[in-house]
Structure formats: structure tokens, C-alpha cells
Amino acid sequence: MCENGPVCENGRKQDAVSWREVMNAFDILDRPGASGADVVAYWREHGVTDAATETVTGEGGRTDFVRAVIPGKAGRRAGGGAPTLGVIGQLGGVGARPEQIGFVSDGDGALVAVATAASLGRMAGNGDALDGDVIVATHVCPDAPVRPHDPVPFMNSPVSIPAANAHQVDEAMDAVLAVDTTKGNRICNASGFAVSPTVCRGWILRVSESLLDVAAWVTGRPPVVLPITMQDITPYGNGVHHLNSILQPSTGTAAPVVGVAITTETAVPGCATGATDLHSVEAAVRFCVEAAKGLGRGTVCFHDRAELARLESRYGPMTHLQTLGEEG
């Protein structure tokens, strides 16, 4: 342990605030009775006054959706024009009770989202408000179901993807970071987090150079890119294999979406407990915070709008990939 508590990595002292928020958020979510009300209360303790929760019941059970808005000094809430970032924690559930006891690997997306909102709230309260607004959304389910998946089992969401998008994707989001555990594969074999190419209106675009810069700066290592395919960006329910749900928010918005994948060197089941690496989570929280700073300032860009327009002009729209399509 370093002075004041944070764990060291490679001999460097880690940021005290983000470590504190990650550990406190983990304590809140790693409980049989974890709830959206607990998360909202935690956020409000950190100065996030615009926070709410709603319980939604689906075919797989019930979950609490949570949402927080951290206003920026030049954001739309203040009458300014700085863009709004969305941070969405993607997951099936934070627990798989009664089959599993404890916090499951799949819960990392929610953990990053909850800690990110708390960190931004604390920063704003200390006078370090960002330029743009940030909207953070995720859901909390301590007893989500498990489903088969190759090569390892996945967690299943209590509610459908369209229902999750309806509660987590906001039309006010000008760009979205979708954070999701992405360990149940043999495609991205690195410990930490990876960023995906930008997905916008059915197009898989080039990887954002400015987000690669942010990833390198917060980790001190070369950035890792998550490979994705066209079928990964189509909606669940069309009968094809998906890497996971990381880019499902892209099916519900016209804004550019980038996946932030919590990754490992080996395939880890989403329902595995004791598999959350807090170093990876904390680095992802810092990445989200720094990306939010840069987007509001104009130093971070998710995609080249002119290039996307040129692609659509030459090849046509790809928005049909945001739908279930037609049966052949």
C-alpha cells in the first residue's frame, strides 16, 4: 500500500480519489441487497444532486436503473455549447445469486460507472467542474441469471437490450463510452482495458486517435484496441454471435459510441466471482474522467463527422444494422 492508502503499480503512486471511489463503490455493489437507492445515496454524498433510480421488471427478473447528471460549467445545463458525454455501464448483473456468492466479473461496467460519477461529483464540489455535462447510467441487479456462451458462460440481463437502452441511452449524449466486462473471449488477451473502434449509425469507423492518447496517458502503456465485427454492433436477438453487449448502446443512438472493455489475458466467465481486478477498474475510471475532460474542451474527438458523411454519401446509410433486420 502507498501512503494515504492507494495501491502502487509499477512503483508509481495511484490517484487517491479514484481509488477511494472504486473501493467504496465496490463495497456498495458487493452485497446481496445492492440497490439503486444505495447508489443514488452514495452519489449524493459526493455532490451529485441530479441522481435517480427506477426499478424495472423483465422476463429475467428485476433490476434498478440508476442515472446521474454532473453539469459542466459550459455545458447545456449552464446554457453553454460544450458537448455532453454519456458513460454507460453495460452488464447483466453485479451478482448471480443464489448460484454464485459475491460480486461477479460481469459487474465491472457498473462499478466503473458508479465510481466515475462519484469522482466527477467530488471534483465538481471541489471546484474542478468539467466544461461539458456528463450523464452516467447503469443498472444494479444482485441476482441476475446466467446463460450459456462460447467459450465461457455469460451473465444474462433481467431486462431486454431495448429496455436497457431506453433507460440508459439519452438523446442529450453527444458521444458515448460504453463500459463492459469483456473477458469471456479469446479475441483480446490483455490485462487492463481496451478501447473499440468508434461505432456510429451502423458504421464501424477508425479508432479515435485522441482516445488512444488518453488510454496511453492514464495507463503509461501502449493502448489496447478491442477488435469488433459487424455482427457485434447489431442488436441482440437476431440469432448471430456477439462478442458481448459492449456496443449494444450503439443500436439505440445516432451518437458515436466507443466501447471501453475491461479485459484479461485468459477467458473468464462473466459469472465468475473474485475475478474483478480493481487496478483495471480504477484505470478505466480515470480514462472515462479524462475523456470527459477532453470532449468538453474539444481536445478529444470520437469520430470525423466529415469522413462519416463522405462514407454515407458514397456507400449509403448503414442504419439498418441498428435494427433486427429481416428474416431471409
Image: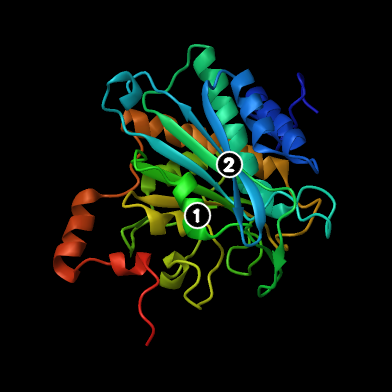
Viewer-proximal residue, 57 or 110?
A: 57
Q: Is residue 328 left or right of residue 221?
A: left
Viewer-proximal residue, 143 or 122?
A: 143
x then y, percent, for residue 50: 49, 25
Quadrant location of the N terminus in the rendered image: top right
* Vertical comparison of 210 with 28: above or below: below
**Viewer-side label of 1, 2:** 1
x then y, percent, for residue 170: 40, 42
Q: Residue at x 77, y 52 (%)?
A: 275
Quadrant location of the C terminus in the rendered image: bottom left
Q: Residue at x 27, y 22 (%)?
A: 80
* Vertical comparison of 152 with 199: above or below: below
Viewer-proximal residue, 308 or 155?
A: 155
- Secondary structure under the numbered disc 2 in the rendered image: helix
Q: In the orientation shown, which residue stands out farthest toward the left?
A: 313
Residue 284: image tag: 2
Q: Is residue 96 left or right of residue 185?
A: right
x then y, percent, for residue 65: 57, 42
Amino acid identity at mark 1: Ala
Q: Is residue 22 visible in the rendered structure shown here?
A: yes
Going from N to C along the chain, the mark reached first, 1 or 2, is: 1
Q: To which residue does mark 1 refer? A: 163
Res 189 quadrant in image? bottom right
Q: Residue at x 49, y 64 (%)?
A: 227
Res 74 quadrant in image? top left
* Vertical comparison of 143 with 12: above or below: below
Q: CA distance from mark 1 to mark 2?
A: 26 Å
Q: Residue at x 33, y 63 (%)?
A: 202
Badge 2: few (under 14), some or many (20 or more) residues near its Cα, within 10 Å? many
Amino acid identity at mark 2: Ala
